[in-house]
Amino acid sequence: GAEGEDIAYLLGRLSHAQKARRRALDALVDRGASESVGWSFTSPEVADRLRLEPDSLGRRFVALENPMSDEQRVLRTSLLGSLLDAAAHNVSRGAHDLTLVEQGTVYLARDDRPLPDVLRALALLQTGRIRPAGWGAGGAPQAADLFTAKAMLAAVLDVLRVPWQVEQTTAPFLHPGRAAKVVARGGDQVLGWLGELHPLVAASWDLAGPVAAFELDLDAVVAHAPEVPHYADVPSVPPVREDLAVVVPDDVTADALLDAIRGAGGELLRDARLFDVYRGPQVGEGRCSLAVALAFQ
């Protein structure tokens, strides 16, 4: 918290939160993202361009008493608008393949007190052809989509050792069926959102093709990041591996299946991961086969 950061400052070293925020940004820059620094000031019309509902948090703007211009008369409630501005600026000048990241503060007005909530956020935006994270120079570029952004999201949360999962959701600025909320595993705290932008939102910034993005509440993420890592002894017995294929209705998510497997697997189940999805006449219409790799040790 703030008290811990004050003590770290007096002792002349970075606090755990400061280290975690730097590691989160470095994880994205190390994978090819370009850091963007946007204005904290914006226009309330950005909420209309993002198709936000009238009573949504994205419209809880803090108005400035002496703004520099009419386009900068409120404080931003999200980093997405400034990233879209940066992307539109680059695309209009011929740079179409973009991975932009910004770490900054957002501000939410409060009805019960004069001062707003000031939150630290981390956001990423991708458009055009993207080289997959972690593949190095040899990775073949692919179009930006939900999965390229999810790979970058995983890079951040995994380096901070934050257990997480995604759950399907809806948002007015995200593409239907390609939107998810990021949740801390083992709890119900929402850490942020992930998805492809709604085509109307992308068109509002003159961006063609898929635009993928995510935004995290960095304070919430850091709160789940362990300050001291815990190490376990390396077992002397090799793992026993087993693959299972489970036929489920299409509306059953892979995360729901993996949660059920982890809950039933007991202490010996060390890992469970999805490695294949099959749809076809053998499993029937409206159903799919999810193949899961299990490791017991």
Image: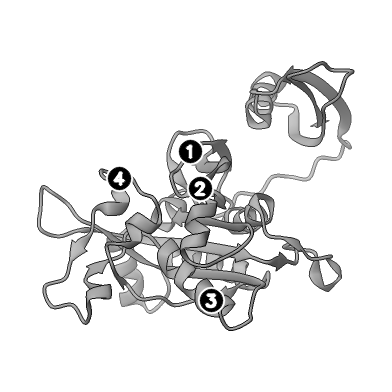
Quadrant showing the N terminus: bottom left
Q: Amino acid at mark 4?
A: Ser
Q: Secondary structure at mark 2?
A: strand
**Residue 165, above or below 240:** below
* Mark 4 vs 2: CB contact within 8 A: no
* Mark 2 vs 1: CB contact within 8 A: yes
In this figure, which residue is indicated by the disc labeled 4?
56
Q: In which quarter of the view is residue 41 placed? A: bottom left
**Mark 4 crowd level (few <14, some 14–19, many ≥20, 10 Å Cα):** few
In this figure, which residue is indicated by the disc labeled 1?
170
Q: CA distance from mark 2 to mark 1?
A: 7 Å
**Mark 1 crowd level (few <14, some 14–19, many ≥20, 10 Å Cα):** some
Q: CA distance from mark 3 to mark 4?
A: 28 Å
Q: Amino acid at mark 2?
A: Leu
Q: Position of residue 207 (x, y in %)?
A: 56, 66
* Mark 1 vs 4: CB contact within 8 A: no
In this figure, which residue is indicated by the disc labeled 2?
174
In this figure, which residue is indicated by the disc labeled 3?
35
Q: Amino acid at mark 3?
A: Glu
